[in-house]
Amino acid sequence: MRPVDQPSSTKLNLQYWDSGNDSLRVITYGGRSADVTTLKTFEDIAVNRQYLRSKTDELFACLRRVARAPLGRSPRNSDLDHTRELGFDLFRELVPASFRAKLAAAAGGHLLLSIDRSLSWIPWELLFDGEEFLCRRVSMGRILLLPSSVGAVEKQTIRLPLRHFSISDPEGNLPAAADEGRSILELLLELGDRARPVLLSRRVGPIGFIDSLKRADVLHFAGHLDGFDDEAAVRLFEGTCTARQIEKWNGRFSFPALVFLNGCRSSSLDEPLGLEKGQGRAFGLASALLICGVRHFVGTIWEIKDQVASRAGVSFFRALYSGESVGRALRRARESLAAEFGEEAMGWGGYVLYGDPASKVSCLASSWDLLQDDRIALDERCSSFKQNLRSSQPKERFLAAVGLVKLGDRGGLDQLKREIVVLFELLESDDLASRQQGEAVVRVICPFNTTYNANLERPARQRATAAIKAWWKSGNAEDDLDQLACGF
């Protein structure tokens, strides 16, 4: 096994547009800063779609064979060799000759692969350049090219403390997944007050999963994945959450910046993977989450054994929280799996990243000084809010209470509840600035409600305000605020 390359500053960009005929338009650019030009060139490459489909089907048939082998039994080296041959055939068909030298020189760097949605079924990570698989030569991530009519809500910038949710073994039947969640929780606890981890395990249903999507900056799921095509789903306690159901929440709240769905379905290895139509499990869930504003998605594209998946999750987050980029963290996890379970077991190849591989979680910057500065700034804000709680002005007390709750400090919770009338006064005010303050408060204490807009006409504002009042009078409001003040 080849050792991991030293990190490189190189970042390559490769874009594929599907013309719908027997050719693809390819745009290549990037490299070291000295190589960057103001021009981006493209070329049209001829492709044989039937040939691509045949090679891809054969490759996944080989991977299914490897996936069926018990973990303790060494897979055949011939399967790995055959995977290399098929990956090389795909590489020669898809990667322009003009780009191959740049790719070979970029070992240890990042590759951002932008692909037309119709090309997502191709196993790009397993293209083999004659010496190494693409996903092990570089830290790579995919970007989906979608029509402009598909809107997405951007996730707000992550701030300290990081809200990390781990849902592990939601059905109570995967001990390895439960261990994975506990191990990641231990990693997060080492971050001290820089993170507020939440571990949910056993009896986590669809409502708990959606609630975690609402509240997390990073969401990690360790359990079963089910379904095919656009019915792809995560399996939960007494139910599932499908890609279609996730898309229905688009625009209603701010989704996590990163989602890692670490799932397997070892009980149904004989069923088709659904990847041949470009609508596989990882793609279906990934596209739904990305459309809803998730910036990075990590998922599986075939069956991953429980123990392998558990090691992958822990290795990924250990590298990510050590300051590595998202792409490099996944690449470190691949190398860890190859070292522990053997390259021929191919578990390292079962993961795909959608998103810019060079990105880092903003609050996990490698500079301790920067983290300290962020922490000091938060402490100063908390102190200022607590001082304002003693103000003689109800509005100032209320806004200070909201600020404390937003930072995960329970000190303002009782004050917020006592003076909630201030919120409705702001929402119903004739003054635009006051209404805008009210709108900002709504996005903090009931982020699922995005219908209120300070600039709307009065009837629309009144309807939205009535919905917020109904939420406040319901039993859900108390629970939502309690969880929010616990750092959720």
Image: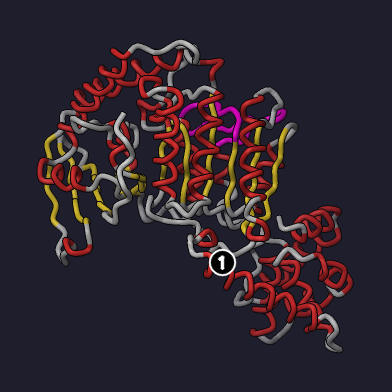
- In the rendered structure, which amino acid carries the disc numbered 1? Leu
* Image quadrant in which the C terminus is located: bottom right
Secondary structure under the numbered disc 1 in the rendered image? helix
Q: Residue at x 70, y 71 (%)?
A: 441
Neighbour tally class for label 1: few under 14, some 14-19, many 20 plus, Cα within 10 Å: some
Q: Is residue 99 above or below residue 253?
A: above
Magenta region, residue range: 222-243
In the rendered image, which residue does mark 1 sit on?
371
Q: Is residue 221 above or below residue 319?
A: above
Color style of the picture: secondary structure
Q: Position of residue 284 (x, y in %)?
A: 46, 36
Q: Residue at x 39, y 46 (%)?
A: 328
Residue 428: say if magenta.
no
Residue 242: say if magenta.
yes
Q: Position of residue 223 (x, y in %)?
A: 60, 30
Q: Nearer the viewer, residue 29 or 130?
A: 130
Q: Is 272 displayed left or right of 412 in the figure?
A: left
Any part of residue 152 in sight: yes
Q: Residue at x 13, y 56 (%)?
A: 41
Q: Quadrant of residue 375?
A: bottom right
Q: Is 451 displayed left or right of 202 in the figure?
A: left
Q: Position of residue 216 (x, y in %)?
A: 63, 52
